[in-house]
């Protein structure tokens, strides 16, 4: 399996802390429209810049004249982020980091990033969504362990009903739990360190806040 990592620079907020830089280490970069503004803070030069460029200033264009651009019309059927992900997949991505995918002014875009991540995970891709301050990963049937700091907050968001959900090494453990669709039962748990998630059936997203110890 190809495990090459591609980071997609998206337009949402991004905090370039050490944890984020470690996650991005060794990645190849593709910028989606205004997400190019994160390149300087990360100290990287993307290999491709895609989008309709409606969120890109002339100053940003002038700053990166040598990055190959792949323009699209504004009246297109995909978001700039989805186009960037498609380009990464064509280049052999096995792991995709959506940097700048969480929060922001456009709730519809943020929700679409969640759905896209789950869809990519269903095809066998390893996916991380991050703002630097928050991280999210899809949870599908099987087992997954996340390296979270002791005392940090996390939630499990069910995009379907969940069967056989187990949470280990947490303040509020669960064992083979059935989570009805729409339930808030798995919001705001606290990690005791690395957390192991096990799921028998369903689709979910783990949303972690590794620097938030307000639940401690």
Image (cartoon, grey):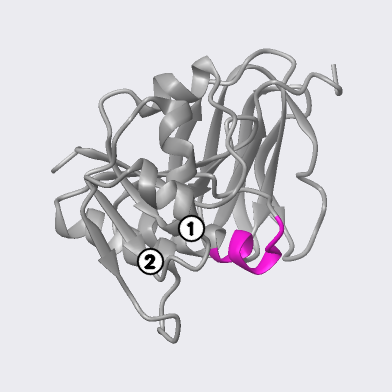
Residue under the image location 43 percent in, 65 percent down: 53
Check if residue 2 falls in the magenta segment.
no
Marks 2 and 1 in Cβ contact (< 8 Å): yes
Relative depth, front residue between 130 and 152 = 130
Q: Can residue 171 be seen in the rendering of this structure? A: yes
Question: How many residues crowd around disc 2 within 10 Å: few (fewer than 14), some, or many (20 or more)?
Answer: many
Instruction: Return the residue at label 1.
Output: 56
Q: Can residue 202 be seen in the rendering of this structure? A: no
Q: Where's residue 126, x and y in %?
A: 34, 44
Residue 138 against residue 53 in the figure, above or below: above
Question: How many residues crowd around disc 1 within 10 Å: few (fewer than 14), some, or many (20 or more)?
Answer: some
Q: Secondary structure at mark 1?
A: loop
Q: Quadrant of residue 94?
A: top left
Residue under the image location 52 percent in, 40 percent down: 198
Q: Which residues are magenta?
A: 105-112
Q: Secondary structure at mark 2?
A: strand
């Amino acid at each position: 399996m190809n495990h090459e990592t591609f980071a997609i620079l998206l337009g949402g907020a991004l905090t370039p802390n050490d944890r984020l830089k470690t996650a991005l280490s060794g990645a190849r970069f593709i910028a989606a429209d205004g997400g190019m503004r994160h390149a300087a803070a990360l100290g990287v030069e993307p290999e491709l810049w895609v989008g309709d460029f409606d969120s890109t200033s002339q100053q940003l264009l002038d700053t990166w004249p040598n990055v190959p651009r792949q323009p699209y019309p504004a009246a297109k059927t995909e978001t700039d982020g989805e186009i960037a992900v498609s380009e990464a997949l064509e280049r052999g991505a096995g792991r995709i980091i959506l940097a700048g995918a969480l929060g922001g002014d456009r709730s519809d875009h943020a929700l679409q990033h969640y759905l896209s991540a789950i869809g990519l995970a269903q095809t066998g891709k390893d996916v991380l969504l991050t703002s630097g301050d928050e991280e999210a990963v899809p949870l599908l049937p099987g087992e997954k362990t996340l390296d979270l700091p002791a005392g940090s907050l996390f939630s499990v968001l069910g995009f379907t009903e969940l069967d056989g959900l187990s949470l280990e090494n947490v303040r509020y453990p669960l064992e083979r739990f059935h989570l009805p669709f729409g339930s808030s039962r798995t919001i705001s748990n606290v990690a005791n360190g690395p957390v192991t998630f096990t799921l028998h059936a369903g689709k979910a997203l783990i949303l972690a806040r590794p620097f938030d110890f307000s639940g401690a």
